[in-house]
Image (cartoon, rainbow, N blue to C red):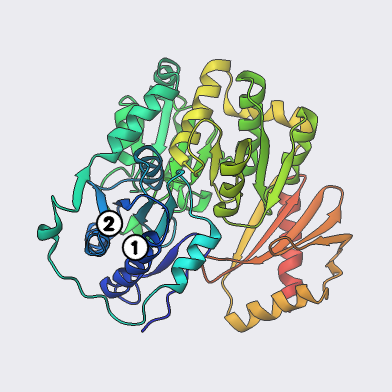
Amino acid sequence: MYNIKFGTDGWRDIIADTFTVENVRRVAKATSDWLNKQDLPKSVVIGYDCRFGGEMFAKESAMVFADNGIHVILSDGFVSTPMISLAANMKQVGLGIILTASHNPPSYNGFKIKANYGGPATPQTVSEIEDLIPDTPVELAQSFDKYFFELIEKEDFEKLYLDHCRKNFNMEALESMSSSFLYDAMFGAGRKVVAKLLPDSNIIHGDENPGFLGRAPEPILKNLPEASQMLKENENLTIGLATDGDADRIGFFDENGRFVDSHHLILLLIEYLVDHKNMSGKVVKSFSVSDKVGKLCELKGLETITTKIGFKYICEYMVEDDVLIGAEESGGIAIKGHIPERDGVWMGLVLMEYAAKTGKTISQLIEDVYAKVGKFAVERYDLHINNDLKLSIVDNCKQNKYDSFGEYKVERVEDTDGFKFHLGNETWVMIRPSGTEPVLRVYAEATDSNAAFAILEATKAAILN
């Protein structure tokens, strides 16, 4: 049998190759076996996003759980990952399951496990479930219709999420900006909820297209040309949001159509939550996040904690500690007052509320941050190289073989998760193999994009030669 392994954020594989009904059943069986051993409610919520086969895989999972005596509340239609996490928390079930490959290319689907606190299952839980995956096919005693009504029921998790949003946001402030708000749904699971919350907003790529126009539904600049162009050309549009396939990651634009990366969004959120909403708490960030976040936190007297890459590491702190913001470089951000889960739609609404309440544009709010921490840019290369070369580069990092990258001298190295080479003057370059894709990621921070790209080019030349 195929050896199923969970990555940084769930199990993901190519549909009809290794992501098959047979293998989904095996993972669902392991998850149900784990749950039956725990002192947790013997119930789960299950949902699926807009990818090909999502409903089918969700029903197969539901049948396996039901066959093992576990009550299933199945989503009535596609949902985002945050909707399943919220449902797991509010329904107080044993676990939440979402069939999604998040931002991966359209050929992929996946299986994510959510804990009943409303966030990613702990690494220990995932490891224990992985160890329980059977080596033989899982047979089912009955059809879906036979399980339905007895152990499987359906519920509208989208409504649960909409009600939660309306209770927690200043809807009047959001509606005042609705007509100038552009949302690129990327054909993903956030498309209906934004239309219902803000019916006057401008939505693109909000129809059904499991092929995602042939693009990976990752909300980064190269995948959002239409949104950027519309904001540049239409002066009536002043703020832009994009979310990925399962709507847990955020992409963002200012009024000029300039992409605002997560490093800047984290700083804006700190400013709003602390200075305008009088909130406090620790800031937990992944290893690849800009050092400017720590600088702003120091100015505001906030403690910062750095974790490995993967929101599950951040979530552990959010569940156990007083955390204001948990954030990744890759667009995954969570804040106090919501669930301990990444939520692209929620973060977009918070930033929109910030702009509405201050009467400032996003670029003006960013300038306010620059006045405190200085200007900066973080850029990234995704190097698609063969596995042998990737392993060789990582091994060279482990053996401290890189003391410079072209003209850039290494002053010190951190290895929390990957290798971050500090180059002086608040600049650094980081090398790390992806945990979800066959790529080597290289990041660089400098005073502006040109300087960051210069570091990336020098690093690329050094490690590939």
Q: Looking at the picture, how far across and down is residue 393, in whole percent?
A: 71, 76
The answer to whether residue 74 is above or below residue 442 is above
Q: Is residue 196 left or right of residue 367?
A: left
Disc 2 residue crowd, few under 14, some 14–19, many 20+, Cα 10 Å: many
> Which amino acid type is marked by label 1?
Ser
Q: Which residue is mark 1?
A: 32
Question: Position of 77 compared to 341: left or right?
Answer: left
Relative to the observer, which residue lies in front, 129 or 199?
129
Which amino acid lies under the numbered mark 2 shown in the image of this protein?
Ile
Q: Secondary structure at mark 1?
A: helix
Q: Quadrant of residue 143?
A: bottom left
Q: Position of residue 257 (x, y in %)?
A: 52, 36
Q: Which residue bears the numbered disc 2? A: 70
Quadrant assignment, res 254: top right
CB atoms at circles 1 and 2 under 8 Å apart? yes
Name the one closer to the observer, 47 or 147: 147
Separation (CA) of disc 1 from disc 2: 7 Å
On the picture, is 302 further left or further right than 106? right
The label number, if any, that marks residue 338 in the structure image: none
Classify 10 Å Cα crowding around label 1: few (below 14), some (14-19), many (20 and above): many
Residue at the farthest left position: 146
Instruction: Name the foreground residue: 273 vs 381.
Output: 273
Please give the name of the residue rendered at 58% of the width and 66% of the height, measured from the top-left corner. 434
Tell me the element at label 2: loop
Residue at 57 percent of width and 80 percent of height: 386
The location of residue 195, given as percent across then percent down, is 31, 32
